[in-house]
Image: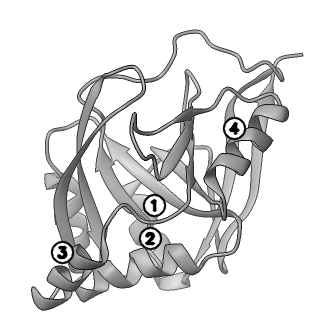
Amino acid sequence: MSHVLYKVNNLKNSVNEFRKKGFKVEYGSKNKPHNALIYFSEGPYIELLNKAPVSIFIKLILRLWGKGKVVDRFEHWEKEKEGFFEICFENYETDFRREENILKEYGITFFKTKSKRIDPLNRVLKWKLLFPYNLRLPFLMTYFNTDPKPKNFIHPNGIKKIKHISFGTDENLVPVIKELCKDEILELFVGNGIQKLIYEKVS
């Protein structure tokens, strides 16, 4: 797994709240950030997301290009209630060849794009994204060109990593997700969204 998305209504306030809970939080971008990250040395990280990183103009262009399903996902994110709501898978390849073959076998269409940002440490992070048009499926990304995760790090509150995530989707999509991601921390159920997230804490 790559990361878990946590919807926030006010990014600055939420960053402060998570810091008060003993997490080390860094903003995603050096200038005008729309998100913030809680990294762990091992496993998926947490992304605090205020709004999708696309302008109204880009959304319009995507709809004109026939990519409205991608816009639907972004707008769905923005309407979510505060809390954990979405997961992302990752690979360590330069493309999504394996994942594309899986999705095509199930007749699932998708949209691919590239992204990059300059983080607060002046690292230029680059990656690719794949968004299934079915909003009940997680999206995917290739790993960053530069690893932003700290080494051998434990948060001030003693939390080492995320050790369990239960994610709900449609019954017919469970086999697809199992093929896309074989991470043992992921538990699937028939339902909606993220039901449970458990941390591993150093005793």
Mark 3 vs mark 1: which is more N-terminal?
A: 3
Residue underneath mark 4? 163
Q: Secondary structure at mark 1?
A: helix
Q: Answer yes or no: do the residues labelled 2 and 1 have beta carbons within 8 Å? A: yes
Circle 4 or circle 2, nearest the eye: 4
Q: Secondary structure at mark 2?
A: helix
**Number of numbered discs visible in the structure rendering:** 4
- Residue at (84, 33) in percent of width and height: 20
Report how far apart the C-alphas of labels 2 and 3 lie in the structure. Answer: 14 Å
- Residue at (82, 20) in percent of width and height: 158
Q: Which mark is residue 65?
A: none
Kind of residue at badge 3:
Lys
The one of 28 and 43 positioned closer to us in this rendering: 28
Circle 2 or circle 3, nearest the eye: 3
Residue underneath mark 3? 104
- Tell me the crowding category of disc 2: few under 14, some 14 to 19, or many 20 or more residues within 10 angstroms, Cα based: few
Kind of residue at badge 4:
Lys
Kind of residue at badge 2:
Pro
- Residue at (71, 67) in percent of width and height: 82
Horizontal side of residue 100 vs 188, given as left or right: left
